[in-house]
Amino acid sequence: MPRMEIELTSTREDGQWTWRAAGARQPRGTVANDLVPDDTSVGDVLRVEVEQFMDGIEVTSVLADRAERSEPETLEMLGSGNNEPLVTTKLAGRRGRRRDEDGPRGRSGKDRRPRRDDDKRDGDKGAGRKDRRPRRDDDKRDGDKGAGRRSRPGRRSQARPDAEAKPRARRLRPKRTHRKAAIAALPEDQQSLARILVRDGVPGVRSAIETQNAAAEAVNEPGIPAELLLKLAERIHPNLRTADWRDRAESALAGVDDVDLRDIRSVVVAAETAARGSEDRELADRLRDALTARVDREHTAWIGEVTSALDEDRVVRALRLSSRPPKAGSPLPSPILDRLAAAAEASLTSDTGQDRWATVLDAVALSPVHQRVTPAGLPEEPTEQLLDVVKRVSMGVPSIAASFGIEPAPPRRGRRSRPRA
């Protein structure tokens, strides 16, 4: 899904926000209030995911700003603590036997067992194999590939799945039943225009007219009437937009239990302008009720996951889960917030490793308890890596940043490089 940066310009009486592209006049549009964070104000620049439809650009979700990591995360290698040689060697020969014990063997060796005459077979290789001594279990060597694979202790055929990984919600893939029917109902000379409208909208029709007229002018031929085609496109556009929305709404209602919530919300928001008849409004109401029921279920499950993580003393996971509520405007209950803040404070002590300190602090800055956490202790000599993390999240945890002697400041945004022609 494409992403862009938008600037909030004003609020409307119905609770929606108006926006425009950051640093530009166009494009413009509105975004629902439930998608915008609570502490947002006019003039803020947000990173959002959008979808391009026939009637313009629609904001489907707001993304959290993520600062670029200055250095990669590293793991400290502790080792076993035993004083062992750094390099060990073992000379192995055929089937794992030591050459200094068995003597030189191989193609150039001279201690092979002499082959008897009765072992030779003229042209019959299979019979020669049958006369061989059957191999016993104690003859298997460590170098045997088949035996080695079967005898390795603790070997797993498949990688262990991540216990925290959740199945990714499938994206909305609507059918094109109503769209195709709407195009087929038009006269044949208007169907090509309708296909351009469905794919690129009215701006796409205008661009196609300009391209065709430029090509006609190059060969001294008359161009097509632009105003007439644009009026025709504006006349048939609403029916096509409604048909396209009906396809998406029916697919969203059929998969309301497992389709991505962002896609379902985008269909519900588009119903305000695309749903025209009584059947469309009834379909929009059913989809809105199904979306509300699913969000309530996921909100209950989300509270259970945060509580379970706290019970298992997984503080970082509980903090990160608390920052991603499925239902906007419905925070965690007060007892859970108190437990979350207490667990975070207990994890930020002077004895905590600085890598762990930085990880917990980064999770606290995005959690709903970021203003309530007071560390139990600070590192005596903080490293540059820890101070960089404190500077980056200083706006979310100003009191903790002040305890390090750092003035809260917004993170620096890197410049975007312009694509080369």
Image (cartoon, grey):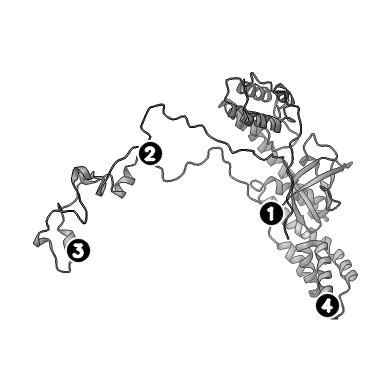
The extreme bottom residue here reads 220
Instruction: Tell me which amino acid carries mark 1.
Output: Ser
Q: How crowded is mark 4: few (under 14 residues within 10 Å), some or many (20 or more)?
A: few
Camera sees residue 63:
yes
Q: 123 or 267, which lies in front?
A: 123
Q: Say few, some or many: other residues with alpha carbon within 10 Å of mark 2 (under 14 / 14 to 19 / 20 or more).
A: few
Determine crowd level at label 3: few under 14, some 14-19, many 20+ residues with C-alpha closer than 10 A: few
Which residue: 16% across, 56% down?
Answer: 132
Q: Is mark 2 on a helix, strand or loop?
A: loop
Residue matched to label 3: 126
Q: Mark 1 points at which residue?
A: 251
Q: Which residue bears the numbered disc 2? A: 154
Neighbor class of circle 1 (other Cα within 10 Å; few <14, some 14-19, many 20+) is some
Q: Which amino acid does label 2 sit on?
A: Gly
Who comes first in sequence, dot 3 or dot 2? 3
Farthest residue to the top: give it.
376
Evaluate if marks 1 and 4 touch, with contact meaning CB atoms under 8 Å apart: no
Residue at which label 4 appears: 218
Q: In which quarter of the image is residue 385?
A: top right
On the image, the x and y values in percent for residue 332 come to: 70, 29
Provide residue 357's location: percent of width, then percent of height.
61, 27
Q: Going 74% across and 41% down the picture, which residue do you hit? A: 413
Reply above or below: 217 against 321. below
The three-letter amino acid code for the residue at tag 3 is: Gly
Q: Is residue 180 left or right of residue 25?
A: left
Closest to the camera, between mark 4 and mark 3, is 4
